[in-house]
Amino acid sequence: MTYQVPVEEIRFVFKQLADLHGVLGLPAHDGLDEATVEAVLQENARFVESVVAPLNHLGDTQPAYWENGEVRTPPGFDEAFRLFGQGGWQGLQHDPQWGGQGLPRLLSAAASENLHAANMAFGLCPMLTDGVIEALSLAGSAEQCEIYIPPLLEGRWTGTMNLTEPQAGSDLSLVTTRAVPQNEGSYRLYGQKIFITYGEHNLSENIVHLVLARLPGAPQGVKGISLFIVPKFLVTATGAPGKRNDVWCASVEHKLGIHGSPTAVLLFGSGKGEVGEGAIGYLVGEENRGLEYMFIMMNAARFGVGVQGVGLSERALQFASSYARERVQSQPPGRTSGPATIDQHPDVQRMLLTMRALTEGARATALYGAALADKAHHHPDDAEKLRCKALYEFLVPVIKGFSTEMAVEVTSLGVQVFGGMGYIEETGAAQFYRDARILPIYEGTTAIQANDFVGRKIVRNDGQVALSLVKAMRETVVQLRSRADTTSHDADVALCISERLETAIAAYEQALDYVLKQAARDPRAVFMGSVPLLMLAGVVHAGWQMGRSALACMLAAQDGRATDFERRKLTTALFYATNLLPRARAYADAITAGHLTAEYAAAVWRSPSGK
Amino acid sequence: MTYQVPVEEIRFVFKQLADLHGVLGLPAHDGLDEATVEAVLQENARFVESVVAPLNHLGDTQPAYWENGEVRTPPGFDEAFRLFGQGGWQGLQHDPQWGGQGLPRLLSAAASENLHAANMAFGLCPMLTDGVIEALSLAGSAEQCEIYIPPLLEGRWTGTMNLTEPQAGSDLSLVTTRAVPQNEGSYRLYGQKIFITYGEHNLSENIVHLVLARLPGAPQGVKGISLFIVPKFLVTATGAPGKRNDVWCASVEHKLGIHGSPTAVLLFGSGKGEVGEGAIGYLVGEENRGLEYMFIMMNAARFGVGVQGVGLSERALQFASSYARERVQSQPPGRTSGPATIDQHPDVQRMLLTMRALTEGARATALYGAALADKAHHHPDDAEKLRCKALYEFLVPVIKGFSTEMAVEVTSLGVQVFGGMGYIEETGAAQFYRDARILPIYEGTTAIQANDFVGRKIVRNDGQVALSLVKAMRETVVQLRSRADTTSHDADVALCISERLETAIAAYEQALDYVLKQAARDPRAVFMGSVPLLMLAGVVHAGWQMGRSALACMLAAQDGRATDFERRKLTTALFYATNLLPRARAYADAITAGHLTAEYAAAVWRSPSGK
């Protein structure tokens, strides 16, 4: 079965949940209308379904491989990437000043979901390139932008982010790659970087590496790290790739998943290029502010990984649903009509609804966040702009943490729906399960997201942002409850969702209160619960969006506009409320016992044999 | 790092939770004492650690492969299996009448955990052979037992279970393999079986296939299936392997995990052997009772898979703990001493404690069940024997369902602890994650366990067995609460565990009540919640055992006998209560909304586009 972009669903989220109207009303999007958005979405669907999706399983079984310092991507990836560039997909959200299309992030987030659903291993290349474009736009000089951004936008070149070293993973303070100033204003870099996604490949004429390194005499730790552009080929005066720089791919990793995507070990300064020893690099922005620049664009990268989680989940859901409609086994309980397709069995329905509810909840949260990012960039009112920025930044770790952990769960259920066939690689469900497992790890593990969430996004502003969202959630509860008081046929659903949502919100509030009170007093107690708190925030935020979805569907039914889509969506929202929202209380119970747990755990970890 | 059998932990569970004393007091184990049990456990540890564990990663990277109808297992598997047979490990629990050692299942379950922890792909061969020995003991003729069981026990031959066909997975009523009676009392079998674990390999002189097939004119459905012995080589008058039978391995599957274990497609009756066309088979027991025989031994097989889950989790836990003690990254929150090993970081502690708590809770539940199985077989008092049998059978789906779903969670956390390194195959954490994913599928998916649990184990006896266990759990709550009333330094822990356990038990009771009331009225509502109910039972039963563990540890502390082991165990029990028991309420909330969810889901699944 082939992947189909859930256009109707995306359209629903755009309009009903993510304020497409408000986004199109921003001055930056003057002249852009719903019809254009729809046309882009349709064209995007056509492209990813027909060009990118068919390469997904192939990329898994014929991985990218290393040969004599070069890397070959799976068959068809080069042609698909050429079409991707030609179609202008790399430039979707970027500044028209450099040749981008300047479309809303709301739309580019949906396009990105579709790309990753179609082929996550392929989608990583544009995703990293997006990051490089973003970083250069924010911190690069005008000249650097002029040289590097247009070919990146056109898909002629691609970009990479070089952060990790063997001893420096989550802890970038331990970076040791050196940058030595040269006479002509450039630098020579020496060191080794690992886990470099698309660090070497055959998809583009040139690769623009952004590299974290230390200047001589730089302060220790994170305040002594600078950011450099290190192109694979130095750029000539005409903007063409010239001499081969001294950056080399030593190997690519043999990974659990995303086999189509080469993960490179890069060596800087081994003396093999056409430029002498040391990779030639150019400082981006000011010295020693590299990590800061990386963090500016980190929100975008983390948001992007969250969206990958949504895409992969959607793909796994479609794949499992399709099988469940065809596979006949046993007579369902409560039926007498003999063996039926397994989508008629209550537990398979439970699994598919769990997959669907998590996917839709996570998508709605991500796209809601994307619209906030648009307003944070472009809202004419400064106060509103700042408010949207705070909300967006608050949601980024939630979107990253929740969507990615959720993707692991959804793809695991995707295997389970297939039963024994799910365990056979040729089936394809196992690939999604393997691919998904990187999501809670890269661009900051779930714990890194959770620490950011607790420290920077909650404690630093005394929980103001979190609580302003809680207030908005309560408005949805009130609206649902008022529907529950009517005599409409869906009053029971409205009541159930409102009750479950209120209970979940209360649990979240209680956990926030605990964290705010304990943060200074007992940080270890708080950080024992930081991941549960992030998951709690995720499950409640997604539950809120599902509650809002339910309201929209009930309104459509009342107006006689409801289609099968709304009826299904309402069921999914109900299922989310009954089966997933109850997790909120469980997380809160764990979080609020943090002091006791942390105290005992610390005692064990202090004892020499407590291992 | 190498795997070490958790001998101290197993000893604790034997004595404090699983009534080793009572098991050794059974007449069947007359003459067996604690010292012998300890000696067997030590020798088992030595064997699996030194012979079996070192082959685990090798088996993953050099999978079993098919060549010209034969299958080669990974390097070293043959020699290890020879030593396994020589050491008498296959006969541990089996009847001395056929050459077994007749040791308690409590001990053999621990040995089995250790074997699977060391190497699950390897352990599957003895596990399936156990199943064949069990089936023949229960349903075979004396002659069949004499011919087949001794060489199976000695590890000269191995066994397989042939149930699945392409169209008949969970639904065995759809089996179509045919058995045609011959003049001399034997049968000829024709058909194709898939997913046959160790269906072909080079570890033994002969393979004894137990095959489900239909006789001519047999009733449709499950009541027309008979069980046959189909040896790979027919057995000569002297008991040696003779003519090659007409059963052939057409291929082995390319699987997500357990690569060392060949999963065969077997063809019966392709005419290529030395016996003419049709695989020669021998009826086991009576005609058309094959599925019944399979079900008799299914409890043992399902219990065995649950134990695999415990073993694999223990392995993943040890592997992650070991890495966390060595990997240095960042300064932990609340500390000022600079970068530390990641086992000092609260979130890594949370992950390791989650892994440990789930593993220990599942192990205790499994071994508690194993002791019940011993009493169910051998208790001199008939009433007590029956009671233990009912309890054991009740616990089997819980042990299978909970331990295996838990193993997926634990091995996933095991990857997460490693961060990016966890995603690299050479590291080894990913193998456990891949291996684990089969556990909730084979020997009956989690849904199959859950349906058995709800239908046969709860509703059929009006919840009597479930509620008798609830009563026993409440006694533990009372004991904990009485400790909470003391002034001892662990009173706060006792209070916390007692409260959380009571809350979880109450949630479980409420869910049981719902299921008992709705079962006849609205079966679909109940079966929408059958898997959540099974998980709820698992989390509460394991939590009960952790509560009992806490009591034992507090008692040891009071008597001045507590070591680091007890202090760590108490922390794990506390963590289980605070972080895992709260899941009970979340499951119960989902279950008790079953009628609403099922009603809406049914409406969607009826609509033509509700897919």
Image (spheres, coloured by chain):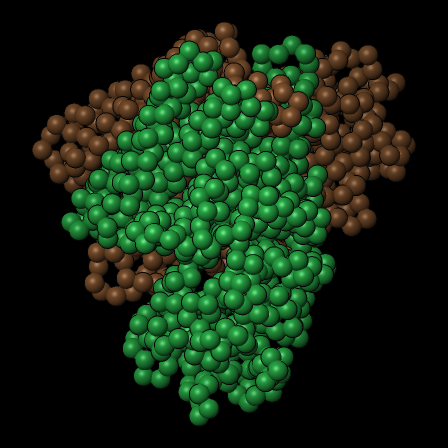
Chain colours: A brown, B green
Q: Is any part of residue B161 visible from this angle? A: yes
Choose between A597 and B255: the one closer to the eye. Answer: A597
Choose between B69 and A131: the one closer to the eye. Answer: B69
> Quarter of the image holding residue A199?
top right
Q: Is any part of residue A432 visible from this angle? A: no
Q: Residue furthest top?
A: A521
> Quarter of the image holding residue A516?
top left
Q: Residue furthest left?
A: A487
Residue positioned 18% across, 44% down in the render: B517
Residue positioned 49% across, 47% down in the render: B24
Residue positioned 81% across, 22% down in the render: A178
Residue A410 x/y as whole percent: 44, 43
Residue A142 x/y as whole percent: 67, 20
Is B218 placed above or below B536 here?
below
Q: Residue furthest front?
A: B31
Residue positioned 68% across, 50% down in the render: B47
**Quarter that holds the N terminus of chain B:** top right
Residue B581 x/y as whole percent: 39, 30
